[in-house]
Image (tube, rainbow, N blue to C red):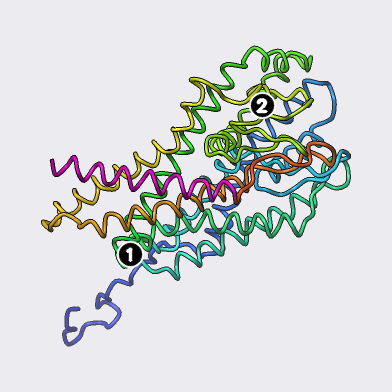
Amino acid sequence: MPTPRPGDDPGDVPRPRERRPSGRAPLPVAAAVATLWAAVVSYLPVALVLGGARFAEDAGSFGAAARLGLAGWLLGHGVPLQTDAGPFGLAPLALAMFAAWRLARAGVHVSRAIGARHHPTLGRAFVVAAAVGTGYGVLGGLAALALGGDGPTAAPLRALLTLAAFGALAALVGALRTTGALGSLARRTPPVLRDGVRAGVVAAFLLFAAGAGVAGLAVATGGGEAGDMIGAYRTGVVGQAGITLVSLGYAPNAAIWAVSFLLGPGFAVGTDTVVRTTEVSIGALPAVPLFAALPEGPLGGVGGAVLAVPVLAGMGAGWLLARRMVLSAAVRQAPPPGWANLLGAAAVGGPVAGMLMGGAAFFSGGPLGSGRLAEIGPSYWQVAAGATVVVLVGTLIGAVASRVVTRA
């Protein structure tokens, strides 16, 4: 600052510039805006699909369609609904995945808004996740209250707690990546454990992709029957399109059931029923397009070859694990990883994949009323055990094969 000269007026002396605000938004405001936007974006497709199907039947009003959309929105987050036919708890996982993606983006936006970007501290990421989860839980409780007593209903406290946990976990993923805490945590993790977790996640994705392929093939094979079921509803083009979209909402569920089928435990489509490679006992089922893909009997002949798919998925994860460990060592100009590190990481991948697939199996099932369809989906602990064993064997074989080929 220039020195004042004699006779100068002190008011004429220039003063240092004041620093402008950094532009950071308060955490409550940022969390409220991002959470509300995530809820609206995930709710609108459900309301449009279910509301359009309802209007196609010339039944209900805009208010009833909006409440039906709220019911479907809550169901997509795992909140069971109470209906005249009993509890309805089979959540469409496609909607759950879409909502989780939007909440993860909300975690990213809130982290940026409060200036937590590139600040690798777990504390800030957890604060963002807690703020988003709290707001999302409040919206879930309000949605359950808005349902009232006409049509499907949901317990407000259950909706609040479920959506709060759902929102916090999804937002935590986005906040960890944005703040850099995830990378910092990974660098402090032992390399064997870090590589094993990555291999398990890759194996779980490969298993899910294999299940999606098998489920898609089964739907294509029974496409004529599924089309007849949709046409039998007599709801017009709009209603049939809505039924098709609802069926697509359950496509991830079908993929996970197919994984359970390939692993061996199979799944149930009602009480005292089972669908596995060695036995199919289902009985009469309602006219639901998703059920048109069910096998008519045990696999035999060439069809039994699909049972090798889970092992191949594990082998692929093990091969990629070994390749990545070798390339990472080359980048660091370090010697190739030893057999102990390689086999240790491959052994960790099996339990990780088992936990992921067991959790997916747990959320893929649920009741469709209190009658015969009260049990739908696979046994999560059997899927977890089967995936652990198969992926463990497959990753070990794939890792060893990749290392042998690389040395050769």
Q: Main secondary structure of the magenta part?
A: helix
Callout 2 amino acid: Leu
- The quadrant in which the C terminus is found is top left
386 falls in the magenta region: yes
Identify which residue, 105 or 36, lies in the foreground.
105
Instruction: Residue lying at the far bottom in this picture: please name it.
Output: 6
**Residue 268 coordinates in the image, percent (x, y):** 69, 37
Depicted 117 relative to depicted 9: above or below: above
Quarter of the rendering containing residue 159: bottom right
Query: In percent of the image, x 38 and y 60: which residue is there?
Result: 182
Depicted 286 relative to depicted 128: above or below: above
Taking 295 as reference, is 55 left or right?
right
Disc 2: which residue: 290
Q: Secondary structure at mark 2?
A: helix
Taking 15 as reference, is 155 left or right?
right
276 falls in the magenta region: no
Q: Where are the magenta residues, as a range? A: 382-408
Callout 1 amino acid: Ser
Please rate how many residues cluster around mark 1, counting C-alpha atoms within 10 Å: few if below 14, some from 14 to 19, many from 20: some
**Residue 310 coordinates in the image, percent (x, y):** 45, 37
Disc 1: which residue: 184
